[in-house]
């Protein structure tokens, strides 16, 4: 082979090898050469599969690092295979955007896995499974895995009862940046009930809990001794609080109903 042809071949082959090496080294699970970053905070894992009826929902806090998260979770129903007061400690990893969390659960092992979304706030193709113990599942079940933004800001809306009575409310809420030792977050703040004789506004927010996509809080007036305990769910971005139930006690009660608060 003439020298110039051999030199050309070597140059072309070397070029192809370098290009292939660069292509392979730049590949990742999201296809753009980068790894997504897991958002730490308040998460919820749930499944509507019939085989998951004894463990339909888990919520709690992920902390640690975005590549080696740890968590404290619990069920949200007394009809589940373990009580909501039972903590589930999880440890995990994030590699090539695949997130895996494992932990001991009622004598068995809980495993949660899924592909981290580009914003780091959810898992796609998520599943969870429990092998062994009293909560064992027959197989892994498809699941929704979602981070919930903080309930922090100014919210306004109304509470209404079945008789058509409407309570207007404006509330300022701040969620704790870190959870307690049980994986629950708390709220602080105050609320006003304009032109409402049952409350000497503003009143303080107390007895609160935020876990996954649910919340509960109390508005209590120490002067009139009236209080409203509200509970419900909220949107993943924390902008809409849907009050599925509120109960008014005190001289103006009893009364109950539903409501809606929207972040301003």
Image (cartoon, rainbow, N blue to C red):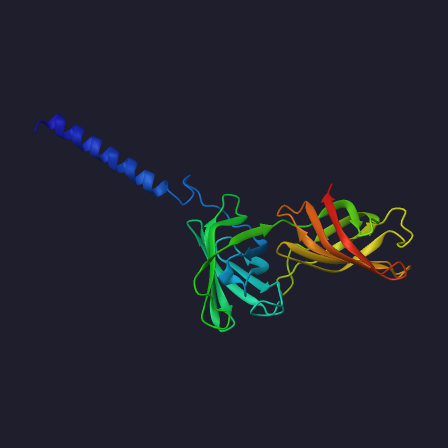
Q: Is residue 235 left or right of residue 98?
A: right
Could you say where residue 191 lies in the image, as x and y percent from the top left? 81, 51
Residue 142 x/y as whole percent: 47, 55
The image quadrant of residue 239 is: top right
The N terminus - image quarter: top left
Q: Is residue 19 above or below residue 218?
A: above
Q: Disc count in the image?
A: 0
Q: Is residue 75 left or right of residue 26?
A: right
| Quarter of the picture holding the C terminus | top right
Q: Position of residue 146 (x, y in %)?
A: 56, 51
Q: Quadrant of residue 187?
A: bottom right
Q: What residue appears at the point 58 percent right and 55 percent down from the top-left corner?
A: 43
Give the residue at the far left of this rendering: 1
Q: Position of residue 112 (x, y in %)?
A: 48, 59
Q: Please tell me which residue is depicted at 59% across the width and 59% down the height of the picture.
A: 59
Instruction: State the residue in front, 58 or 73.
Output: 58
Which residue is located at x 34 percent, y 43 percent?
Answer: 25
* Image point (51%, 60%), residue name: 50
Viewer-nearest residue: 84 or 19: 84
Q: Nearer the viewer, residue 196 or 188?
A: 196
């Amino acid at each position: 082979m003439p020298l110039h042809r051999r030199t050309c071949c070597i140059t072309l082959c070397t070029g192809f090898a370098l290009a292939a090496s660069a292509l392979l080294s730049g590949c990742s699970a999201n296809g753009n050469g980068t790894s997504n970053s897991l958002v730490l905070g308040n998460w919820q894992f749930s499944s509507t599969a019939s085989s998951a009826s004894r463990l339909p929902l888990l919520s709690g806090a992920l902390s640690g690092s975005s590549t080696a998260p740890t968590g404290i979770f619990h069920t949200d129903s007394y009809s589940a295979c373990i009580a909501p007061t039972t903590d589930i400690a999880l440890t995990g990893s994030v590699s090539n955007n695949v997130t895996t969390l494992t932990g001991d659960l009622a004598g068995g092992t809980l495993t949660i896995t899924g592909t981290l979304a580009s914003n780091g706030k959810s898992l796609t193709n998520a599943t969870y499974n429990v092998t062994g113990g009293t909560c064992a599942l027959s197989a892994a079940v498809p699941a929704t895995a979602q981070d919930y933004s903080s309930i922090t800001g100014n919210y306004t809306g109304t509470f209404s009862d079945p008789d058509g009575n409407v309570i207007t409310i404006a509330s300022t809420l701040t969620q704790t940046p870190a959870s307690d030792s049980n994986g629950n977050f708390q709220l602080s703040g105050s609320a006003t009930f304009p032109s409402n004789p049952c409350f000497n506004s503003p009143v303080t927010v107390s007895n609160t809990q935020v876990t996954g996509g649910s919340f509960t809080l109390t508005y209590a007036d120490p002067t009139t001794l009236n209080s409203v305990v509200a509970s419900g769910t909220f949107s993943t971005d924390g902008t809409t609080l849907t009050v599925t139930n509120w109960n008014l006690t005190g001289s103006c009660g009893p009364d109950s109903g539903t409501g809606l608060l929207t972040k301003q």
